[in-house]
Amino acid sequence: MTALEWTLIVPARGAPHGKSRLAVPRREHLARAFALDTIEAALGALPASALLVVTNDDLLGPYAAAAGARVVPDPGAGLHGAIRAAGRLTVPGSALGVLLGDLPALRPEDLRAALRACQVHPRAFVPDRAGTGTVLLTVHGSVLESSFGPGSAARHQAAGFERLPLPLPRLRTDVDVRDDLEAVLALGCGRHTAAALAGAVPMGPGPEH
């Protein structure tokens, strides 16, 4: 099967409002670092022009733009509003995915493997490690209609998306609470999250390809 040319939407709220349920010091820096590591992994998996990063964060936006990604201003209407804003810039019926922006253990090879599995199905999703949420949602040949939020896996499955519980823990571990962060640390987090945990503001040069 010929590989599809994906467009990937990455909603990235960043600081200071992201990760409100994560009760750890320097939460705002960690929220930004999670998004930076997610964007960096996505940039390693796909051409930069294939990424639509939705954010108003004053570090995430310039970082993504400098790497060649398209940056979409977040309209401030929540996750679904961010997805709709980016979706308007895509070609109807094209191969489109939404990747959550809080996957600090993600590696490019994990995302590439997931997209290969997703392309077999017109509508598919990868659940989080608990099996109740969604970390990656994809469509090709139809309009993307997402239902993110608590319990999204069941809603996506009921809407006809194929559930793909892939053995990709780095992809499936998003971070909402302290236990999630501990799971990420056991897997190995990205460089921005490591820097934030060490007390540094997550910045640094752009991703290397």
Image (spheres, grey):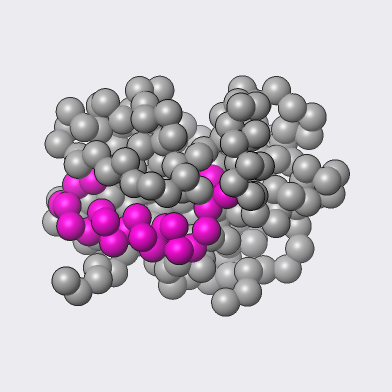
Q: Quadrant of residue 96?
A: bottom left
> Residue at left 49%, top 54%?
53
> Residue at left 42%, top 58%?
111
Count of numbered labels shown in the rendering? 0
Q: Is residue 129 above or below residue 71?
A: above
- What is the span of residues highlighted in magenta in the rendered image? 103-125
Question: Magenta stretch containing residue 113, yes or no?
Answer: yes
Residue 189 horizontal/vertical position (percent): 64, 49
Residue 102 horizontal/vertical position (percent): 55, 42
Q: Nearer the viewer, residue 74 or 166?
A: 166
Question: Magenta stretch containing residue 109, yes or no?
Answer: yes
Q: Quadrant of residue 34?
A: top right
> Residue at left 79%, top 29%?
25
Residue 147 horizontal/vertical position (percent): 31, 31
Q: Is residue 156 above or below residue 122?
A: above
Question: Left of 44 or right of it: where is 58?
Answer: right
Residue 206 horizontal/vertical position (percent): 67, 68
Q: Nearer the viewer, residue 109 or 167?
A: 167
Q: In this rendering, does residue 189 appear at all?
A: yes
> Residue at left 21%, top 32%?
157
Q: Residue furthest bottom?
A: 209
